[in-house]
Amino acid sequence: MKYSLMTTEQKKAYKLRVKAYRIAHPDKVAKWTKDYRQTEKYKEYSRKQARKNKLLHPERTLDIALKSSRKRLLPAPTRPCPDRCELCGGLPDGRVLNLDHDHKTGEFRGWLCKKCNLNLGKFGDGVAGLQQAILYLKRNSKSLLPTDAAERKKIPLSSGVLDYFPAALVEVAKVSYMGNQQHNAGQPLHWSRGKSADHSDTLQRHLAERGSIDTDGMRHSAKAAWRCLAILQLEMEEAGAPLARGAK
């Protein structure tokens, strides 16, 4: 018989039987409870209850977050806890979302689900770590050249670039070597992107003096060509091309 159809006396008797079973078989009850809480049915029920509590008792939900923040020495939130994670848009795993804050300034940032909050910390809780992850994914996301043979023939790297501009590419290679000696002395040749990144302005300065030699013996035109290639490479990577092998 369904519990909702039982009489008051039957419900009391049922509750006593359940209580007695829990006392007699604690291990079985613990295992059943653990397994049930992993089911989608229970998770959906928990989410519905959390949303219901937020609607009926918004001050109680915020109070839970405030007490949690004070207990862990976190800043007080400046806005109420929303229904969904402000990073991924997902629903919370528990009663409320996690309060996120800047670990350097201590300031409140927002509300995140457990996964987003943990993963943000794993990437150093800053932009630099996330950018490195993005660059890593781009580097391994796709091939630089198309896999179709017909399409590959439309990209004549040797006959269409090297054979067109051999002397110019030699001068550009010299600029790369000179730049590495200047910015990364003693290190293997690589494009250190955190240094001298004002490509557009530097390009214009070298174009203004094209046809002449710079103070370090490099041609201004060669340096202008290097900057043009740098701008195009960054533009292509932004569009989805894999990260250049020689970039760091």
Image (cartoon, rainbow, N blue to C red):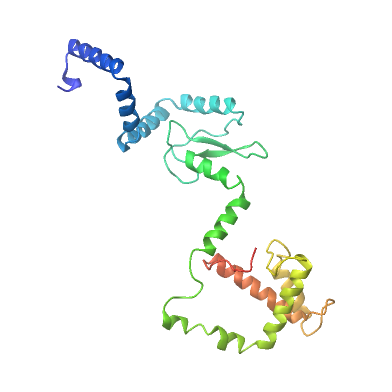
Quarter of the picture holding the C terminus? bottom right
Q: Is residue 164 positioned above or below 5 on the image?
A: below
Quadrant in which residue 52 is drawn: top left
Q: Is residue 105 positioned above or below 174 on the image?
A: above
For the point 56% across and 70% down, the residue is 236
Q: Would residue 193 appear left or right of 210 to someone viewing this image?
A: left
Quadrant in which residue 55 is drawn: top left
In the image, residue 131 lies at what x, y percent?
A: 59, 55
In the image, residue 66 lies at what x, y percent?
A: 55, 27
For the point 43% across and 25% down, the residue is 57
Let me know if residue 114 appears in the view: yes
Quarter of the picture holding the N terminus? top left
Q: Would residue 30 appear left or right of 142 to someone viewing this image?
A: left
In the image, residue 147 lies at what x, y percent?
A: 43, 76
Extreme right residue here? 215
Let me know if residue 113 appears in the view: no
